[in-house]
Image: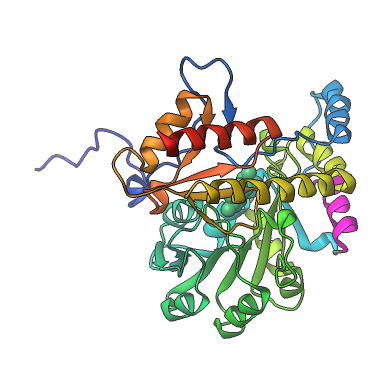
Amino acid sequence: MTAPFVPVAPSPRPGLLDIAPYVPGKEHAPGVAKVFKLSSNETPLGASPAALEAVRDVAGALERYPDGQALALRQAIAEVHGLNRDHILCGNGSDELLGLIAHAYLGPGDEAIVTEHGFLVYPIQIRAAGATPVTVRERDLTVDVDAILAAVSERTRVVFLANPGNPTGTYVPMEDVRRLHAALPKSVLLVLDAAYAEYVRRNDYAAGIELVSGAENVVMTRTFSKIHGLAALRVGWMYGPKAVIDVLNRVRGPFNLNALAIAAGAAAMRDRAFAEAAADFNMLWLGRLSAALTALGLKVTPSVTNFLLIHFPDVDGKRAPDADAFLTARGLILRGVAGYGLPNALRLTIGTEEANLAVIEALTAFMEG
Ligand SMILES: *Cc1c(COP(=O)(O)O)cnc(C)c1O
């Protein structure tokens, strides 16, 4: 009689060990007194004072479970954006919503399309669901709608599109997003990740609200982590068809947003003047930094977001890793983007005036050195 097979340790589902864990932006510059973290696209302006006050109010009642429907937050989003709150789902960051979508709509044997320099959270969630990410090339660091359509197969279930893109900072005009949607099979869910929508000032850009409203297979995800300055609290939201919201409501945790997140998010959403001023500040420095870095001979990808993708010369001592070390030694922490297929570039988040001027000064010294 042969002995039964006895595993020596618990083993995860097939494929999970193929996932490369997400690596967040660096935070530390060892030995440097003053550090500017410009590696995670956080706002330099903090959160709305109204959001901070809301947090203080809720902090007096931490023994209470949050509202599992996040009604106050959904109501604030619905009012400000003119949407039906029944079509809004909130998440513990939009990362949670992306994960819920993958787990609800993907499984083994399914494919989901992502783009060459797309957000690395997508392939992680696709693999975690047991499905296969299919990566399509971009053109000039911009998503190519035709390349996505050419990659659609009978197994395609979801398309993840960051618009604007991270780390590129480029965008796909709404006309092209519409064309993409029109040509996709009705069974394919199009996910428009509009994490940076609030920063975009282009007439031919739209985050996707109208497209969602008129279709059964499009969702738009948004975040409070960027312009609203609430990254620490983890607040995201999604606008989608009732059927999709209903599915995700079945699989999410019952209290997926904490009470501080709900209250602060609602207050931040209603403080439109704060967000508008943040967008103005960003526009000003996006222009100034782009011009200053270009004048140094660096190539900067035109950005509509709160960050810039800087390309370094392919010359000994002047490549991206050299610049990264040079800047880090001066307390300026940018984001290496080799993991996004861009080994000779760094991503710079627009910071405070002081941080931005320090970046210009340091890169001037780097290029002259
Ligand atoms: C920052 C970012 C998000 C936001 O994630 P949260 O989980 O809401 O903090 C989503 N998508 C992209 C492309 C981002 O860069």
From the image, give the main secondary structure of the stretch colored magenta: helix
Whether residue 101 is situated above or below residue 30 in the rendered picture: below
Q: How many marks?
A: 0
Q: Is residue 96 left or right of residue 151?
A: right
Quadrant placement of the N terminus: top left
**Magenta-span inclusion, residue 274:** no
| Residue 23 in view (yes/no) | yes
- Give the image's coloring scheme: rainbow
List x then y, in percent, for residue 177: 62, 75
Task: From the viewer's side, name the closer residue of 164 and 285.
Answer: 285
In percent of the image, x 47 and y 50: which residue is there?
A: 297
In percent of the image, x 63 and y 53: which residue is there?
A: 97
Whether residue 193 is situated above or below residue 69 in the rendered picture: below
Task: From the viewer's side, name the closer residue of 139 and 91.
Answer: 139
Residue span colored magenta: 70-82
Of all residues shown, which one is farthest toward the bottom?
183
